[in-house]
Amino acid sequence: MRIQELADTARALVADHKGLLAMDESNGTCNKRFAKQCIPQTEEARRAYRELIVTTPHLGECISGVILYDETIRQSKKDGSPFIEVIREAGIIPGIKVDIGAKDLAGHPGEKITEGLDGLRDRLKAYFAMGARFAKWRAVIALGDCLPTQACIETNAHALARYAALCQEAGLVPIVEPEVLMAGDHTMEQCRATTEQVLLNVFEQLHLQGVVLEGLILKPNMILPGLTCPQQDAVEEVADATVRCLLHAVPAAVPGIAFLSGGQSAKLASARLNAMNSRSNARAAPLPWALAFSYARAIQQPALEIWRGRQSNVVAAQRALHHRAQCNVAARRGAYREAMESM
Ligand code: 13P
């Protein structure tokens, strides 16, 4: 196993206050988002949208890595240049989503298990040959009456760890993404308790499978109240609860934590990350890991709403995408301000 290369890639993914851009929506998810904007749900529209993203001027100044989907990693710009080349030329590391989705967990209504381990070794080999240097696997954990069950937590943690071990064997840095969902009326404290339990299980399984912590990136949810919880906690409370939870559960050897946005608004995702970093900058002892971002919706959504499938909107959409990326780089420094939103 090329441990030094894995550690170098993992560190590069969180270096220079940059972060990750997730553009790995499956065709189904991408089509659903297109449908809301009345964009045709075709392969060509998905290709054109991904071309808009990867050709955004100066993207590499803010984005260290992009997460692609199997269809996208094989696509090219209209002029024939493969996306993977365009990405590398922009100084961005290409990554790939390798799970095949969350399916119903047998015997556990309302819970999911992420699938995709069968044949994964060969797929990882092929993606490495194409130029990918990191991968992503997302597990989803629902919060609710008597949920999650220990069965759901343990099966998902086990799958994440087996995926991570296979990635490292293939020379790819695994992004380990256990997402405790925002849907529901649970409190921030319930989210914290469940997230901590999930993360402790995930790191136990990673240890069992021999995964090298220096060569992975954790992609967790922030500690948030449920979307329909009557009490919506302040940005600073979310920041402190999130950092406290991570300090309890994430070993110091992990180089970086890159949050998912999970359905938060783009502005809140920046403000909350900013609060974590600005409050951490004021701590007596620095945090052991970088606190970064790996957002899909919180970077892409404003751009998608501007584009709406029209060539004439591409430049304005790219400007919006770049602006969100800049806001999140500022949030990594603890220098994001509300005033940036009107620039
Ligand atoms: P969101 O930031 O939209 O939650 O997406 C992140 C992601 O990669 C989901 O797996």
Image (tube, grey):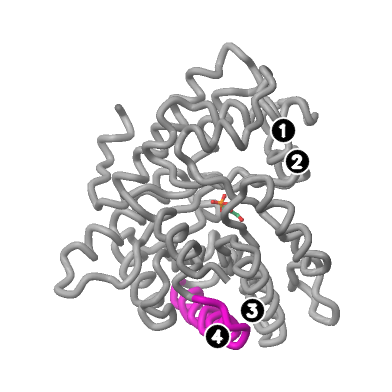
Kindly identify which residue carries mark 1. Answer: 75
Image spot of residue 227 (x, y percent): 54, 59
Q: How many marks?
A: 4
- Above-or-below relation of 128 to 43: below
Q: Which mark is residue 123?
A: none
Q: Amino acid at mark 1?
A: Gln
Label 3 amino acid? Ala
Kindly report the distance in space between the C-alpha atoms of the residues bearing marks 1 and 2: 7 Å
Q: Which residue is mark 3?
A: 157
C-alpha separation, residue under disc 1 versus residue under disc 4: 36 Å
Is residue 199 on the magenta stretch? yes
**Front in this rendered view, residue 250 or 173:** 173
Assign a secondary structure to mark 1. loop
Instruction: Describe the element under mark 3 as helix, strand or loop.
Output: helix
| Residue position for label 2 | 71
Instruction: Give the alpha-carbon distance from disc 1 to disc 3, as whole Å.
Output: 32 Å
* Label 1: how many Cα within 10 Å (few below 14, some 14–19, many 20+): many
Secondary structure of residue under mark 2: helix
Marks 4 and 2 sit apart, C-alpha to C-alpha, by 33 Å
Amino acid at pointer 2:
Glu
In reply to whether residue 24 is colored magenta, the answer given is no
As drawn, is 36 to the left or to the right of 56?
right
Residue 207: mark in rendering: 4
